């Protein structure tokens, strides 16, 4: 494990306790107290650096869950050391960086899997099966809602305005392409601050329209600071029906208030994707052992990042943009 903060700690726990065929042999983190604490809690060893971890002969694969600005460096180093890599999203912070990660993986002959865990969520996986099986005809429209409970707080301008695209909306950008089995040819997007401007470090809302090559479209909304819950929903409208992930009731009025608990609504990603995080690591470890190609590839990671950057360019220019 490289990086055992919020997300990495969960992956480490899952590896140690829920994934057959895997043994968690070492964790590293830039923060000494974090790596020592997690190693002690999970009964493994703490490596003082990534290099020390990568030099270990008993490390066959690594999970990278460091902040995104280190993803390229960490994934490329692991690939050069011949270790298979599970890399949290986003794959890199630039398309050139994503290309370098993919090239290093190819050159090192290693498996590279990117952390789009939604593909492993039971409801999303079933929806995808229905859509691609053609049970409801051709998919026409994908709608995604992706809201975080809390918004980051900081001086205005202290975060990149596009972070909401590359950190949050990216799950739906990948999810929409995966669900529609299609490529995006046009992107329109806006970025906004709808929360408290005095404490918002960057955009906290994005609305993105995607045009797919076969004529389908998507609308994706990502938001930080919904206050009532971590709210993830999708709808796939097809020629002869609709598939809804996240609930639907035509005649019911639902009011969601901050501070109230609601059945089937979660405070955050760690609670919402309990099963998906385990399933994606089981698939990663199974793939490492069987040497089968990863279900979520570096190219998938690059594609979602390219759409996120196209959305950023569209928001800046108010024009429709082609990802590339
Ligand atoms: N797939 C998902 O649902 C999901 C959810 C949350 C976060 N993430 C991703 O996981 C990654 C980590 O996010 P997080 O929320 O856990 O952040 P975090 O800040 O909680 O954890 C990051 C950890 O990395 C450590 N770190 C920083 N620099 C490092 C370095 N150079 N080498 C090793 N360790 C270093 C930090 O000390 C910290 O412990 C991000 O890429 C984020 O986008 C994915």
Image (cartoon, rainbow, N blue to C red):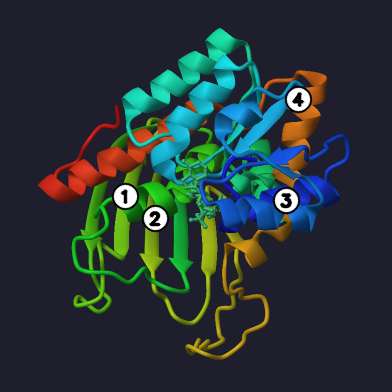
Q: Earlier in the sequence, mark 1 or mark 2?
A: 1
Number of other residues with Cα within 10 Å of mark 3, as a class: few under 14, some 14 to 19, many 20 or more:
many
Residue topped by disc 3: 39
Residue 295 on image: x %, y %: 65, 30
| Residue 322 circle label | none
Observer-nearest of 31 and 222: 31
Task: Say whether marks 1 and 2 touch (CB < 8 Å).
Answer: yes
Indicate the secondary structure of the residue bearing disc 4.
helix
Q: Is residue 288 left or right of residue 242?
A: right
Q: Is residue 90 left or right of residue 285?
A: left
What residue is drawn where x is 53% and y is 64%?
Answer: 232
The answer to whether any part of residue 141 appears in the image is no
| Label 3 to label 2: alpha-carbon separation | 39 Å
Q: Earlier in the sequence, mark 3 or mark 1?
A: 3
The answer to whether any part of residue 255 appears in the image is yes
Quarter of the picture containing the N terminus is: top right
Indicate the secondary structure of the residue bearing disc 1.
strand
What residue is drawn where x is 63% and y is 44%?
Answer: 119
| Label 4 to label 1: alpha-carbon separation | 36 Å
Residue 99 on image: x %, y %: 40, 20
Tell me: is circle 3 under 8 Å from ligand 1. Answer: no
Residue topped by disc 1: 209
Comparing labels 4 and 1, the label whose residue is closer to the camera: 4
Residue topped by disc 2: 220
What residue is drawn where x is 28% and y is 69%?
Answer: 154
Residue topped by disc 4: 288
């Amino acid at each position: 494990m490289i990086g055992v903060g919020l997300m990495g700690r969960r992956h480490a726990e899952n590896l140690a306790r829920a994934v057959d065929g895997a043994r968690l042999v070492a964790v590293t983190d830039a923060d000494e107290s974090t790596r020592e604490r997690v190693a002690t809690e999970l009964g493994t060893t703490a490596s003082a650096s990534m290099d020390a971890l990568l030099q270990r002969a008993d490390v066959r694969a690594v999970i990278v869950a460091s902040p995104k600005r280190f993803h390229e460096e960490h994934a490329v180093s692991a690939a050069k050391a011949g270790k298979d890599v599970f890399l949290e999203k986003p794959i890199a912070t630039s398309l050139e960086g994503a290309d370098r990660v993919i090239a290093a993986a190819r050159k090192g002959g290693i498996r590279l899997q990117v952390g789009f865990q939604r593909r492993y969520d039971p409801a999303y996986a079933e929806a995808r099966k229905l859509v691609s099986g053609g049970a409801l005809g051709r998919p026409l429209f994908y709608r995604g809602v992706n809201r975080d409970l809390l918004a980051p707080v900081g001086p205005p301008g202290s975060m990149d305005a596009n972070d909401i695209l590359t950190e949050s909306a990216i799950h739906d950008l990948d999810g929409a392409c995966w669900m529609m089995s299609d490529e995006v040819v046009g992107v329109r997007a806006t970025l906004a601050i709808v929360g408290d401007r005095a404490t918002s470090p960057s955009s906290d809302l994005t609305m993105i329209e995607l045009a797919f090559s076969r004529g389908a479209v998507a609308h994706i909304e990502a938001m930080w600071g919904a206050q009532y819950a971590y709210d993830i929903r999708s709808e796939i409208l097809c020629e002869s029906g609709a598939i809804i992930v996240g609930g639907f009731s035509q005649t019911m009025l639902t009011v969601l208030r901050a501070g109230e608990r609601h059945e089937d609504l979660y405070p955050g990603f760690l609670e919402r994707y309990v099963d998906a995080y385990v399933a994606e690591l089981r698939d990663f470890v199974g793939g490492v052992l069987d040497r089968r190609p990863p279900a979520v590839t570096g190219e998938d990671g690059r594609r979602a990042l390219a759409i996120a950057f196209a959305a950023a360019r569209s928001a800046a220019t108010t024009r429709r943009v082609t990802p590339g």
